């Protein structure tokens, strides 16, 4: 299932327009906060797909029948670019366990790159609902490599990928290569990738815009 959260008239369109806007992006706090808000909306939409159980609570005046999430999802993100989007998911799924994994593009002299995974911290994933956030689903290579690594911690019942911009090429790559039950929730979807793997029109480098430029490795 692929969901473009900008397709209905909603605040997501406003936030995506600011996230993409080269002038507005210079306000780093607004850039991060918009990603966080997108994470919050994605959390709310994903919550509608989860299962609930009845829960009786005592109020000061009586008994109320409420419905609560049967099983908290696991919230995973790819360091460092995913942190702001992840924070939005954490704001809503505040009781969830977390997983963190670092992935970066290790550039070769000829302009090609490989995805290097280094740090990983993950709870057991067997039969869990995993929500994995990364602001840019570009080629899909780092997403597939991350999923392949995470499933060594157990096979999730379902994986929800949350992203600000997904490229159709990356979506297709994930659908072809990831051996799992997957939904993709995107703030918006673009069709083009540059030779260096940047999404067009996209937004630029999400990690650098949120946290500053880094030394290339
Ligand atoms: N990562 C980014 O930050 N931007 C892109 O366009 C692609 C990958």
Image: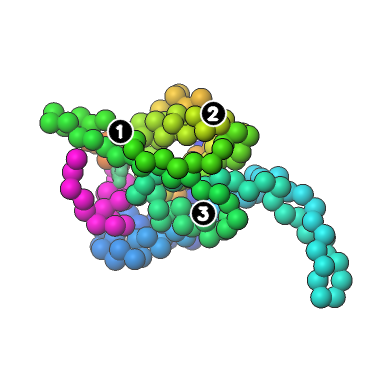
- Number of numbered discs: 3
Write the residue at 45% across / 42% down. 121
Write the residue at 27% across / 49% down. 204
- Percent across and percent down for residue 23 are 25, 62
**Residue placed under numbered mark 3 in the picture:** 89
Q: Is residue 190 left or right of residue 88?
A: left
**Residue placed under numbered mark 1 in the picture:** 115
Q: Is residue 96 left or right of residue 114?
A: right
- Distance from disc 1 to disc 2, alpha carbons, whole Å, reads 20 Å
Q: Which of 13/75 is in front? A: 75
- Percent across and percent down for residue 15 are 42, 59
Q: Is residue 1 left or right of residue 54?
A: left
Q: Is residue 122 visible?
A: yes
- Percent across and percent down for residue 215 are 18, 48
Mark 1 Cα shell of 10 Å, populated few (<14), some (14-19), many (≥20): some
Q: In which quadrant of the rendered image does the N terminus lie?
A: top right
- Percent across and percent down for residue 175 are 47, 28
Q: Quadrant of residue 67?
A: bottom right
């Amino acid at each position: 299932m692929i969901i473009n959260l900008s397709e209905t008239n909603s605040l997501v369109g406003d936030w995506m327009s600011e996230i993409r806007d080269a002038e507005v992006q210079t306000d780093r706090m607004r850039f991060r906060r918009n990603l966080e808000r997108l994470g919050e909306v994605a959390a709310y939409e994903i919550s509608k797909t989860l299962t609930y159980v009845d829960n009786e609570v005592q109020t000061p005046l009586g008994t109320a029948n409420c419905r609560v999430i049967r099983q908290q999802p696991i919230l995973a993100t790819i360091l460092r670019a995913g942190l702001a989007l992840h924070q939005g998911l954490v704001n809503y799924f505040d009781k969830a366990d977390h997983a963190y994994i670092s992935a970066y593009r290790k550039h070769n002299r000829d302009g090609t790159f490989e995805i290097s995974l280094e740090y990983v911290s993950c709870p057991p994933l067997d039969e869990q609902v995993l929500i994995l956030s990364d602001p840019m689903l570009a080629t899909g290579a780092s997403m597939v490599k991350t999923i392949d690594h995470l499933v060594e911690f157990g096979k999730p019942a379902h994986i929800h990928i949350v992203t600000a911009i997904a490229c159709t090429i990356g979506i297709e790559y994930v659908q072809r290569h990831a051996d799992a039950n997957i939904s993709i929730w995107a703030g918006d979807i673009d069709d083009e990738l540059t030779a260096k793997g940047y999404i067009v029109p996209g937004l630029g480098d999400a990690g650098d815009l949120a946290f500053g430029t880094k030394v290339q490795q």
